Image (cartoon, rainbow, N blue to C red):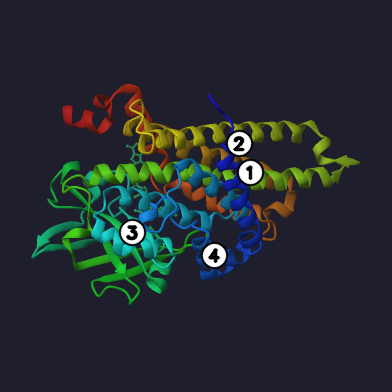
Amino acid sequence: MHFEESDEEKMFREAVREFAQKHVAPVWQDYDKNHEIPRDLIKKMADMQLWAPTVSEEYGGAGISMTMACIAAEELARADLSIALPVMYLVEASWAFIYDLYGTHESKSEILPRVTKGDLFFGIATTEPTGGSDLVNSTKTVIKPKGDGYVVNGEKVYISGIKETEKYGGVYWTLGKSDPKGDHKAFDAFILPLNMGDGLHPGITTTLFEDMGRMGVSTGGFNIENVEIPKHYLIGEHGKGFYHAMEGFSAARVLIGATCLGSAEGCFDIGVDYVKQRRQFNRPLAAFEGIQFEGGDSWMALQADRHLVYHAAWIMDQHYREKNPNYNKLDIARYTAAAKYKAPHDALDVITRAMTWHGAFGYTKECPLEAAYRGVRSYTVGAEGGAHIQKIVMAREIFGAENLPYRQEKQV
Ligand SMILES: Cc1cc2nc3c(=O)[nH]c(=O)nc-3n(C[C@H](O)[C@H](O)[C@H](O)COP(=O)(O)OP(=O)(O)OC[C@H]3O[C@@H](n4cnc5c(N)ncnc54)[C@H](O)[C@@H]3O)c2cc1C
């Protein structure tokens, strides 16, 4: 066992921290109010090879490990407590990574260099009006062969990055069924070109939702009407889309853990500084045991989450990079689900304590902590899979797939 970052990882963390503290920390509260991350900030990140950095060098990425990708997510969220920029970062670092594994060379050559330059957003679209948890029964989007390619019809909702895609360009990793009545083997994953930089595709109409947090990145939805895509936009094998998407969720989930950890660490530091300075009853608040015990609770939670997140990232690296046969995709799913569940929930506790330490000021918009609270809450509500679903993923490994409730229903 080795609990220390390698020299390369330490240097990388240092470089990202310096960048994030210099370029992200001073502006995030502005984009939390203006609801748009400045384009030049994204371009600066791309110049540093920090945009979709997990993509291989062949397609313009830096080919970094999931551990390093998590380090970057953590440092970005320490700087942008609202987690808007880290959300955009992590969606690309996870889904473009899995696309790089299974996409065709032809489509990757066209799309990924533009993604890693920060010119095209690479999003994920699985959730539909009928639900996001039970994709097998909820997915109504249909992909059918037509000519040399496919035609797609359907609707996706609660999708991150819609406004940005409409304005600047973006493609989505999308899930559809080749047979509407089929099970998980009827899914295809494919690239849906919402806006290749020349305006919204004529078959796409979008809507926007107003979220409570992470205001710098938009959430919306889109209708897909007879959108034709070329054959090479299919991601992976026909009928394997569901499985590939599960790998994408795992990658996103570990990065979400790192993001929520980073935001909570940033808030914890602010809280500790505050209680050391703020005096009540003739002494600093930090001198009261009531505050100290809460500080210990927060610190413990952060350490536990740090281990969970980086262990899950390490397992992913063992599987994808080291080809270590001791770790398979089910291990990855279980550990990343744990990181996705625990880090956001603990982060909310840590942030809540730090807000409370600030008294009334902690409840104002002047105090940066409320934006962190609003942002992190998105990952306990549902983004990249609801909280209960993470427990179902873990339970599948604990009790066996045969005891999954939805399989039971089929049995009785
Ligand atoms: C801010 C934000 C951004 C998002 N961005 C994207 C995106 O970019 N792309 C995308 O595809 N989706 C996105 N989503 C959607 C997200 O993936 C879904 O919200 C999530 O999958 C849950 O789906 P749902 O909201 O339809 O809730 P439902 O599936 O209707 O579930 C409702 C509640 O019931 C719980 N539940 C479901 N099944 C069970 C069960 N068997 N046992 C116990 N509890 C259960 C769920 O955990 C949830 O709490 C985003 C969501 C948010 C909040």
Element type at mark 3: strand
Q: Position of residue 296 (x, y in %)?
A: 69, 31
Give the CA distance from mark 4 to mark 2.
30 Å
For label 1, the crowd category at 10 Å Cα-Cα, with few meaning under 14, some 14 to 19 and many 20 or more, is: many
Tell me the number on the disc at residue 157.
Answer: 3
Q: Are marks 1 and 4 in contact (CB under 8 Å)?
A: no
What amino acid does circle 3 point to? Val
Tell me the number on the disc at residue 150.
Answer: none
Q: Earlier in the sequence, mark 2 or mark 1?
A: 1
Ligand 1 closer than 8 Å to the CB at disc 3? Answer: yes
- Give the number of the mark in front: 4 or 2: 4
Residue sitting at x 38%, y 30%: 394
- Give the number of the mark in front: 3 or 1: 1
Give the CA distance from mark 3 to mark 2.
33 Å
Position of the C terminus, as image quadrant, is top left
Tell me the number on the disc at residue 44.
Answer: 4
Give the CA distance from mark 1 to mark 4.
24 Å
Give the CA distance from mark 2 to mark 1.
7 Å
324 relative to 358 in the view: left or right: left
Q: Which residue is mark 1?
A: 265
Viewer-side residue, 302 vs 42: 42
Residue sitting at x 36%, y 58%: 59
Ligand 1 closer than 8 Å to the CB at disc 2? Answer: no
342 relative to 297 in the view: left or right: left
Q: Which residue is mark 2?
A: 302
What amino acid does circle 1 point to? Glu
Q: Earlier in the sequence, mark 3 or mark 2?
A: 3
Q: Are marks 2 and 1 in contact (CB under 8 Å)?
A: yes
Q: Position of residue 227 (x, y in %)?
A: 20, 67
